[in-house]
Image: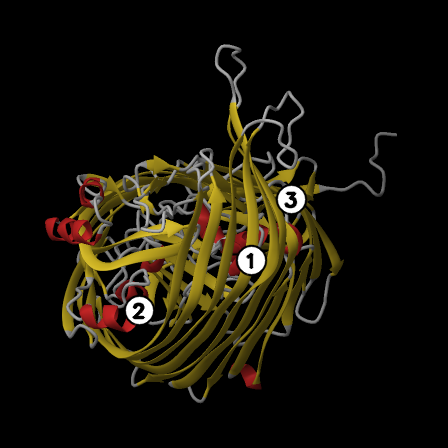
Amino acid sequence: MGAAPAHAQTWGTVTGTVTDSVQGAPLPGVTVLVEGTDFGTATSADGRYRLELPTGRYTLRFSAVGFATRVDSVTVAEGTTQLDATLASTVLKMDELTVTDGAVPNRPGVYKVDPADVQNMPTPFKDGFRALKTTPGVATNNELTQQYSVRGGGYNENLVFINGFEIFFPFRPRQGEQEGMGLLNPALASDITFYTGGFPPEYGGKLSSALDVQYVRPESDPLSGSVDLSTLDASAHLQSSALGGDLGWGFGMRRAQPGRFFGTQDLKGDYSPRFTDLQGTVSYRFSDRVSVEALGIWADNTFDLEPEERTTYFGVISLDPERPSDFKALRASLNGARTDGYTTTFGGVRLHTDLSDRLKLAHDFAYFGTRETESFDIQSDRRVCQVNPTGGDNPSNCTSVLQGESTVTRFADNSVEVRRRTGRGRYEWDLDRQTLKGGWHLRGLHFDDNLNERTTIDGRVEDGQDSTLVDRLDDSATFDEYQFGAHLQDAVDVLPTDGRLTITGGVRADYFSFNDEWTVSPRLSGRFVATDRLTLTGAWGIYHQKPTYRELRGTPTDTASIRGTLDQNRDIRSQRSVQYVFGGEYFFPDRRLYLRAEAYYKDLDDLISYTIEDVRVNYSGENDTYGYTYGVDFQLRGELVPGLESWFNYSYLVSRERFTDAALERYAAQAPTGFSDEFRENRTGLLPRPADQRHTFSAFVQDYVPGDKSWKVHMRLLYGSGLPYTPTSPGPKTPGGAETRIPGDRMSGRLPAYRRVDVGATKRIELVQNGIGGPVHLELTLEVLNLFDMDNTVDYSWTQGYERVPKRLTPRTLNARLHLTF
């Protein structure tokens, strides 16, 4: 009677110790998972783990940041079974750049982004760039754009590399929804490394950040891939190898038609965006010492819109009867259409040659071309009404006092064609306790810029005065120049204990033919492993950013030709940043958490000032300011549950600039008659820079549904305090009586804080256990974007009566997604 049923399941216990294969030291915080499941645990401070499993044969996966993953099989019997494991330290080769994998940073400001987290993160598009907004130091204020600001820098201060080939963002978008998908395809990515500061000399001379993306390079993999389908986009990718692993390839295709998503904004109409790209990478190994790789990208992004109407409410509603409400509405009826197009072509090929086990060479050639067009002819009849929310007023039938009405006609037929051809050589010499690297690059630049646009405003304000303001620009220019650069750096293991103290020093020199300028940029960084739990890092360096065509051209006006402006700017200098970075990371083994903090200071000289309208950057075209940026970034990261990583970030930033005396005099001389003092005063003193976002908080949290680990939930939280902007003020009237506008006090206003919560729930189903290349899984996801339907403002427009009208971003949106992997 006391016997157990014949089908009763018996259990056993697996225990063991995980150690470092070199030093034999126990490794805390190692994740131990049963292969093919999410069931597992983590090692304690002494490197030990314990798992209770039903009797049978299992495969256990041991993984830890900074170490190669190990897989071992074990047969679990009743009682206790011992299985110890040793993990070898791993080093990833990333386009001739050696960095230590995982949470322990090899350099200051380095963050790893897992491509799987990009897939899991609830975002409108899975292009990878939007996932960077949950990285410390990245400004947060617009979900529609792929561009980003890092530690107070501008959108044009970030380097992006795919397989070591540099790629570029759209040249001249006005709004984030026009940009299309970023060129980073996370389905093809194997590693994403993000440098928020202190990056080494082998990267170029941008002032703010470098993003290094490595696409998959299959060597002995069977056919595998994925298919992704949602209500906003669709994608598919395949990868495999052949010829005994000598040939590896991966290809991806994406298509997005997010008209429903964009149409949720205040501006209503017929949205017809069509974003498409094809990407592929191929590698072939001729021998153990010679191999070749190629990367190709073609992207065609088209944004069509037939606007119909826009209603935006703004102002203050008062509940105090002694203080009346000041609540208004802008009602606009629109006629016309606009079309924006971005077609990008990229091709790159690289030859790897290992002359010996220690000396490696790589030479490559790349072509990057893009053609951007914008065409619109839109008439907007606008009226601003005082609205009584309790009196039945509405903006289409105002019964209260009319504050102003106008007709705005905007026309443009613009295009820009950009071509970049780059040749590069890179060399690496591994010595016993140091790695010496060097390289060069030569790049040709070509721009064809054509502008034909005008704006006409006819309006009536309270005093009944009619006014007309015409702004017209019709110009073109061709730009052909070249750049040259070279670098040399040395990474030295200083102390007798391997990896305890690593110092990396180097220098790069760059030349730009446009201004006949040479710049020299020395850099130094270090990493010190103080204890098994504490790592300290520091960096110092000088960074020069050569002026690109956008900075050189400045903001075109109808009083000066683009070619003339370029010719006058032959003496412009590269912007310079002297950076200091110090940080540390502490590991809590019992909780498997990493706490990281970094402080930085940037001394900025020869800056080219700019303003931002939505995502359009308008440069002054002059070295007219100097300033500084300082801040601190914090990150708490780890596996709150085994196998799922989460993190929380907080950043504090101050970024200021001051106009030079010579620039103030020039701007005053160029001001409209009678307004020279105002132009000088509104730029005088220490002013916020456009990316001066004081407080930023972001988080990405993952968890399982209790009782069913086939369900996972993901949540992304973003908060950014208000970015500065320059308000508009009335200017002098023209001889014909037309009103003009001039900038008010520079950066004296602040946008409202940006707040956003995106959530998703995913059900994972195993369809086939043994497919072509392994198990076939289906993931069904429901995402709620902007869960709490928060209003976020990205910019302001101004009425004839100088009313400030907010441009708001997307409200709450539902998105269903299907993701198949095989």
Distance from the alpha carbon under mark 2 to that under mark 3: 38 Å
In the picture shown, does residue 140 fall above or below 393?
Answer: below
Secondary structure of the residue carrying tag 2 is: helix
N-term mark: 1 or 2: 1
Image location of residue 570, percent across then percent down: 18, 71
Tell whether 136 sits left or right of 82: left
Numbered tag placed on residue 549 in the rendering: 2
N-term mark: 2 or 3: 2
> What residue type is disc 3 on?
Thr
N-term mark: 3 or 1: 1
Comparing marks 2 and 3, which lies closer to the viewer?
Answer: 2
Distance from the alpha carbon under mark 3 to that under mark 1: 28 Å
Numbered tag placed on residue 813 in the rendering: 3
Q: Which residue is mark 1?
A: 378
Image location of residue 125, percent across then percent down: 57, 55
Secondary structure of the residue carrying tag 3 is: strand
In this rendered view, identify the residue nearer to me: 709 or 279. Answer: 279
